[in-house]
Amino acid sequence: MPFLVTRRNFLNLSGQALAGAVATRFFVLELQPQEAKSQYVECFKGLDTFIEQYMRAMNAPGMTLVMADRDGVQRVATYGFGDTESHVAIKPQDLFEIGSISKSFVANCLLQLHQEGKLDLQKPIAEYLPWFRMESKFSPINTHHLLTHTSGLPGDGPLFLSDPAAKHRAAYAPGSHFHYCNTGYVALGHLVWTLDGQPLAESFRRRIFNPLGMTQTEPFISLDIREKLAKNYMIFQNDRPYPRHGRLAEAPAIVVTDGAGCIASTPHDMGLYIQMIANFGRGPKGSILSKDSFDLFSHPHIPADEFGPSASYGYGIAVDTLDGHKILRHTGGMVSFASALHVDIDEGVGTFASINAMQGYRPNPVAQYAIQLMRAHRSAKSFPPMPTTDSPVSVKNASDYLGKYESSEGPSFEVVATGDNLFLIYQGARVALESAHGDMFIAPHPDFQHFMLVFGRADSKDPHSSVVEAACGGQWFTNSKYTGPKTFTYPKEWERYVGHYRNESPWIGSSRIVLRKGKLMADGLVVLEPGEDGIFILQDEENSPEWIRFDDIVNERAMHLKFSGEDLWRVMVS
């Protein structure tokens, strides 16, 4: 899927609706003896029914799940397949990469160092890590800012920039805005190493894994543990948006040793971690965190809309509410795993769920429903109704998009509906549209396969105003309701930048730069605003610190794109 779209965690959908990976058989395996004595056994049947429906609807190959409370691990179960070709079931002992949930482990280590007097959370990070190449016209960045994603630094660039003269730049005053920053947590992993005098992996083991009894958890992802991992999958064509039931391919092996997301664990071990959080930082051998440290860990330091309208961010974990209860939660997205951790610290129950594929979503509905079932059982209330999973081809406001759309530069199309299903009539073909996010759709046709089909409204700030235009990459179409300008100007040199850029790292992939309505855009979705020193600032959020620069002009074409420090190179074919 396009790199810049992946970065913002869109639910990406694209043009080839191929058969899903979930087979007609469905396996549920449970780890004994926890389930035999669990007080929540009455919850299992309804939860398993929902999980099967959810996995089929979301095209998930396999899933691992743990339910735990303050007393311990209450259930471990696995679902579906670790090998979709030979139909080998996921096993409870299989490792799953937990992704950014690892950030909470980094935060726990740093809070322990803070307890020991080795770390001042408000001290400039440069005093601990003098090699950290960054500059700011604002106040200094400290550990608190990095822990809460409020540093103002770009989110996904490499910590160690390839240009030895380059520095990371803060886009705004630290502490003033939330912007998810993996780079910051990579730096925090080095901070643990520096202050603890041992590699991050050993700090994880000594400070968290061993005290909690997490004996099967690996502190970093390497080729040495590949045989222990559940077989895992990524999308087959990663240079375009991805459909809900698109084709999957086995993912390549990766090595991840940094603090942004390096842990692989089993469901049982994650249940032990949930138990510690549910007990406010206490483990079976004593406190992992003091009361003051747990309060810092779980405090809503900054609103974090990226996690939801009611969410804030603590230290390495999101802080939210569910049915009036305080929830600590986080998701984890890897190249080929998608995870969700939810802990209700008011009720003392929690769940962890992980899928062995990355398709643009996280199994939050499973974790949330499991918590709701556990709470209902504990209070002797009726179980909540089973959540529904929307069909991507069902569009509640389908009538908004109907009509003919014309372009002065190419073929036109028409949008029609049958019930709440939308269809694109284009060059004699009738193509079913699949909803992605808001006014974005995918159209499984070769002319639309590399970009989202995006509809625009008369008032961009009013989601109920009339749809008056549509776009796909650099193509622009209008309908009879459009009354705005139809000609636009832009600097001639911007034509040098249009094209497809790529990095073969599975983390990065592709980005396509287009010109539309006089604006330079990434992946046909994000406007690039000219900034200082020849860079462009991404306008997908207010106060964005992310930037793009185009380098190495050859025959009036840029050969090299820098995205917040990452390198992508021009693809010389379309």
Image (cartoon, grey):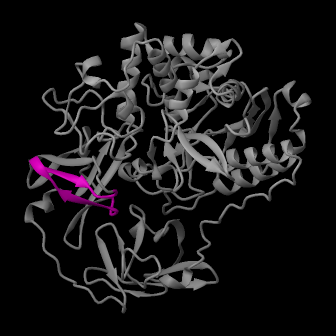
Q: Residue at x 64, y 54 (%)?
A: 58
Q: Quadrant of the C terminus?
A: bottom left
- In the displayed structure, does residue 335 sit left or right of residue 381? left
Q: Residue 439's spot in the image, x, y percent?
A: 46, 71
Q: Residue at x 21, y 67 (%)?
A: 519
227 or 267: nearer the viewer: 267
| Magenta stretch encompasses residue 342 | no
40 or 75: nearer the viewer: 40
Residue with the most extreme top position? 197
Q: Residue at x 30, y 56 (%)?
A: 512
Residue with the most extreme front position? 292
Query: In the image, is residue 288 above or below residue 559?
Result: above
Query: In the image, is residue 205 above or below residue 261?
Result: above
Q: Which residues are magenta?
A: 523-541
319 or 54: nearer the viewer: 319
| Magenta stretch encompasses residue 530 | yes
- In the displayed structure, does residue 90 sit left or right of residue 154? right
Quadrant of the image occupied by residue 193: top left
